[in-house]
Image (cartoon, grey):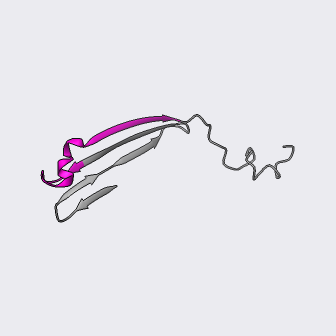
Amino acid sequence: MSVLFFTRLDFVVRPKVIYALTDRWKVTVGAAIFRGPPQSFLGRLRDNSTAYAELRWSFLAPRPRGGAGCRCCTHRAAAPGY
């Protein structure tokens, strides 16, 4: 996400990248970058620019996606011996 004010030439950019290491582990890296002339609203926030990293682990295992081994509610009636 980004915001640019053409009249004052100040802006904020918020890049973010998410990468799934496995089905349960995800890494997120991002930032909030404020720039502009010192007297502008976003220029005054320049010292508040930040960067962050996040490592996330999911407690729930992902559900299977269809196929013969699927045990979700839509395939129970079709699965013999279930």
Position of 60 relative to 80 (above/below): above
**Residue 36 at what x, y percent from top left?**
17, 53
Name the residue at the right extreme: 81
**Residue 23 at what x, y percent from top left?**
56, 39
**Residue 5 at what x, y percent from top left?**
22, 62
Q: In which quadrant will I find the N terminus?
A: bottom left
Q: Name which quarter of the figure residue 11 lies in.
A: bottom left
Residue 68 within the segment the image draws in magenta: no
Residue 37 within the segment the image draws in magenta: yes
The one of 82 and 49 positioned closer to us in this rendering: 49
The one of 78 and 29 positioned closer to us in this rendering: 29
Q: Name which quarter of the figure residue 62 lies in.
A: top right
Q: Name which quarter of the figure residue 52 lies in.
A: top left
The one of 53 and 50 positioned closer to us in this rendering: 50
Q: Which stretch is magenta?
A: 34-57
Horizontal arrangement in the rendering, residue 40 relative to residue 21 (left or right): left
Name the residue at the bottom extreme: 7
Residue drawn at the location 12% of the way across and 50% of the way down: 38
Q: In which quadrant will I find the C terminus?
A: top right
Horizontal arrangement in the rendering, residue 26 relative to residue 48 (left or right): right
Residue drawn at the location 30% of the way across and 56% of the way down: 2
Residue drawn at the location 83% of the way across and 52% of the way down: 77
Residue drawn at the location 44% of the way across and 42% of the way down: 19
Horizontal arrangement in the rendering, residue 69 relative to residue 8 (left or right): right
